[in-house]
Image (cartoon, rainbow, N blue to C red):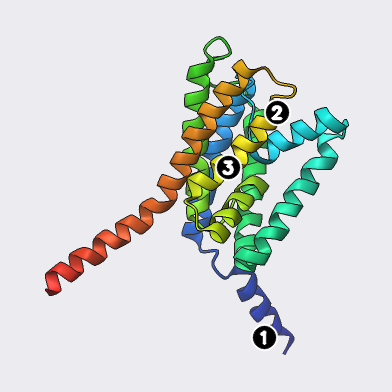
């Protein structure tokens, strides 16, 4: 009996976490964190979403990021659990840990790309591409890289908006509020990077579904 219960529990915990899915999550985490560490952090491009809200709260209320970040992430995941279910949370635990792992790995090495601080437009575009592709791969596997992804996915699910629109809504709201302490010139480049990343996340996530539809259409054509 204990063995059966253990087997059942193990099956529940690993349901939906195939080796292929985990490998793609790791690839996505590797790509997005590489861009953030080597481009955004070097050039000072401000983020939207939870990271931007954390910086905003720190500036307005003087709260430590170590305190406010977990609160914001947990709040987003609780909301996601209500609308997206336990399987999403389970996959997101794996993807969030993968993101943390690769952040730690990249920190062990010196910057691998040139410092683009003097070329903010290039930094905004390059960073947006890395984040968009990396997070898009993670989201396509059914998880999220952090609380902001969970929030955008929940908004998309509830409102039936495209995912890119949900991301832009949250990011632009936070960036708009950030104008209270960040110069407009810096915010403009942040808007560019979140616009690019939002589009790419949506595009990468839907690429598989479009491919399936294409295959289905081919089969229907062959039958007819």
Residue 214 versus residue 35: which sits nearer the camera?
214
The answer to whether 134 is drawn above or below residue 89 in the figure is above
Find the distance from the CA under tag 1 to the CA under tag 2.
53 Å
Foreground disc of the pair 1, 2: 2
Q: Which residue is mark 2?
A: 178
User: Secondary structure beneath disc 3?
Assistant: helix
- Mark 1 and 2 residues: CB-CB less than 8 Å, in contact? no
**Mark 2 burial class by Cα count in 10 Å: few <14, some 14-19, many 20+:** many
Q: Earlier in the sequence, mark 3 or mark 2?
A: 3
Provide residue 174's location: percent of width, then percent of height.
67, 35
Q: Which residue is mark 1?
A: 4
Residue 22 versus residue 189: which sits nearer the camera?
189
Identify the residue at image location x=70%, y=28%.
Answer: 178
**Mark 1 burial class by Cα count in 10 Å: few <14, some 14-19, many 20+:** few
Provide residue 188's location: percent of width, then percent of height.
56, 22
Number of the label disc, if any, that sits on residue 57: none
Identify the residue at image location x=46%, y=58%.
Answer: 20
Horizontal arrangement in the rendering, residue 189 relative to residue 2 (left or right): left
Foreground disc of the pair 1, 3: 3
Which residue reaches farthest bottom? Answer: 1
Q: Which residue is mark 3?
A: 169
Identify the residue at image location x=59%, y=30%.
Answer: 36
Provide residue 51's location: percent of width, then percent of height.
69, 36
Q: Quadrant of the C terminus?
A: bottom left
Residue 12 versus residue 133: which sits nearer the camera?
133
Location of residue 99 (image quadrant): top right
């Amino acid at each position: 009996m204990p063995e059966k219960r253990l087997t059942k529990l193990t099956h529940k915990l690993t349901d939906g976490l195939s080796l292929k899915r985990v490998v793609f999550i790791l690839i996505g985490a590797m790509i997005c964190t590489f861009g953030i560490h080597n481009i955004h952090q070097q050039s000072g491009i401000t983020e939207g979403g939870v990271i931007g809200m954390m910086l905003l709260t720190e500036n307005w209320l003087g709260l430590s990021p170590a305190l406010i970040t977990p609160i914001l992430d947990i709040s987003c995941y609780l909301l996601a659990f209500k609308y997206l279910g336990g399987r999403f949370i389970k996959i997101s635990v794996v993807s969030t840990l993968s993101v943390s792992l690769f952040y730690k790995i990249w920190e062990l090495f010196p910057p691998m790309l040139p410092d683009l601080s003097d070329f903010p437009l290039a930094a905004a575009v390059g960073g947006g591409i890395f984040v968009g592709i990396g997070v898009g791969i993670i989201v396509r596997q059914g998880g999220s890289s952090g609380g902001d992804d969970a929030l955008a996915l929940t908004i998309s699910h509830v409102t039936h908006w495209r995912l890119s629109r949900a991301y832009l809504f949250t990011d632009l709201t936070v960036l708009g509020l950030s104008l209270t302490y960040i110069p407009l010139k810096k915010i403009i480049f942040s808007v560019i990077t979140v616009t690019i990343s939002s589009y790419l996340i949506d595009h990468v996530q839907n690429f598989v579904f479009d491919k399936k539809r294409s295959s289905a259409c081919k089969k229907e054509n062959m039958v007819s």
